[in-house]
Amino acid sequence: MLPIYTIKPTLTPPASIASLKKFSQFEEWLESSTNDADRKKHFWLVGKLTRLLIAGDLAYAGVIDKPTVEEMGALIAKVSKGAIAGMVYLNLLPGRAKNYHYPARQTALAFKELYDRLKEELSDDEWDRMGMDAIVLEHSLCKLKRMHKLKLL
Amino acid sequence: MNAALQAVTQHRILIVEAQVYSFVLNLCLPNARAVLSKHAKHSTLAKHSTHANRSTHADILAECACYENVHAHEKWLIRLTIKLRDMLVLCPHGFTLDSVTYLPNLERQSTFRYIVNKFRNEYHEALVPNQKVLNVLKVALYQWLNIPIQRDAEYRCIMVDVLQQHLGSAVLYLPEVWNMCCEVPSWIYTDDRERQSFNMEEVPLLDFSASVQCLAAANPGTRDNNLLRNLWESYKKFIMNVRTGPKGLPVAIQHFDDYDGVLSIPRFKLLVDFLRKSLQSVHNQLPITDPFYEPLRHKGDFYLPLREFAPSRQNIVSQANTPFLHIEEPVGMFNLLVFRILCFNTQVSRTYSFDFTLPSLLKMMDQYEKKNKAHYHNSRAYGNPCAGWDDRKLMERYWDTAHSAWPLWVENKRKNRMLNVAYLHY
């Protein structure tokens, strides 16, 4: 077997090399292994939200990179579940029908705006104690709408 | 350009608000009077509901206390009536209810602006819970007026003049208008409080045709043929637009690209408050009597916004043999799948140690399957994939996945890391 330094890759590394650890890339890999008419895919029947949860767990475990805020914003648009409802509640996105696909770019920008505002609002101590990051903020947005339904917000 | 547009929009909003409040004045008062007269024997206000004496806070409380058996929406109408009456008294223009509707347009606008500010300054709290009513009234107002806002002055005056001339103050007591107002409270208490737009079909229709026929019968060969024709045209437009909503009205959200989402500050504050309270509840600093605490304490997995503090997550992370220690191994991944897919938001996820192998998992499932399957399987959690499927077979499949696809991905990642290192050294 040749030693590593004799391997001569191309000047630009293949996308798979650079992005395999990327959060969104991993989520895409899970998605591609998820649903199949012949039920042959590995993660058969795993839903959008569960994929996001598993990817989040692996990010915290250090197996993949944590998502950037924009990356998570785009994923929120893709999943289009509770976090979107939370953002609509906050007036960051317009209300739409259930099956509407929100554009990733606008959603990411809105999510970034919220993230930045929250960082300004919370003290550093609170921020750290909450363990706030893009994953937690997405999680919080889902819960926001649920609490609102209970009329506690 | 933007500033000009903003100014126009702002101006338009003010006009809309003015119309809404005008509508409230016109519709709620007669309806509230009816409520009052229904309970007249208990009421002192009913006898003096149009008197121009300002009520004190104590008067209002005493008045509301008379209506123990009255529905909540009726109470709201009573309170609104009292407040509106007070406002009418306080208004420097000294107008009466009847004069509000028929004031010349410009004067009306300034008067309404005064009312709007008055509402904002003094009765803000009273109005907040009833924002939905105002929205409903706005929709109803559009339907009632049936005219684009830009042409409000022209058409509204025509309609009001015609109706006033022939029906007088009875306009305010048209049965259709009356019914519409009575319908409002049923919308206040719907569960779906967040519905942004209203189904136009739900808004009771106003039968203008009856009014127009009545006018025509009462005035054969009237000199106001033009006015009647205009009224007919308005009515036709109303029917035409009834499904799609009145055309020409400013639509709140025209297109996604045009949507300039501005963060709602009050709601943002709610989010911040929610996060802070959740942090307190995690550290048991929130008083148990606070109702806010209940869902966070009993259904943390479902309601707690702080992901890392959710009970199930706390359980799996704090275990000595947590699967995250060896997550890149098949067993680690299998346990993560079991945790998130099969057991999430169940008793097992909050109490068990996640070091399952396939046989031990099947054994655990056997143990509870007949007694209480909900112990390890919550079919409502995140659209649980096991719902409706044979979860045993699914778990066998995931066991295979954890031993085939996952090691492959991990291996690829390692190779890529080596390639990356080689690339950097190259």
Image: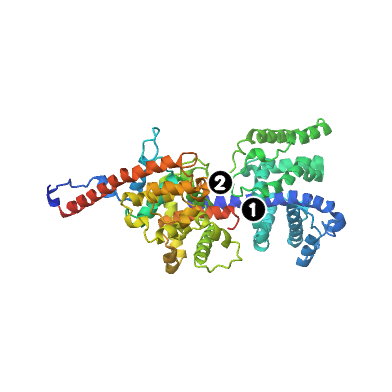
Q: Which residue lies under the disc numbered 1? A: B131
Distance from disc 1 to disc 2, alpha carbons, whole Å, reads 16 Å
User: Camera-side residue: B75 or B209?
Assistant: B75
Q: Which residue lies under the disc numbered 2? A: B252
Q: Quadrant of residue B157?
A: top right
Q: Is residue B176 shown left or right of residue B287?
A: right
**Given the image, on which type of amino acid does mark 1 rest?**
Gln
> Can residue B78 be spotted in the picture?
yes
**Given the image, on which type of amino acid does mark 2 rest?**
Ala
Outermost residue on the top side: it is B221
Task: Residue at 47% x, 53% y: name it.
Answer: B348
B123 vs B150: above or below: below
Percent of width and height locating residue B130:
66, 54
User: Camera-side residue: B359 or B57?
Assistant: B359
A101 vs B50: above or below: above
Percent of width and height locating residue B38:
84, 51
Mark 1 vs mark 2, foreground winner is: 1
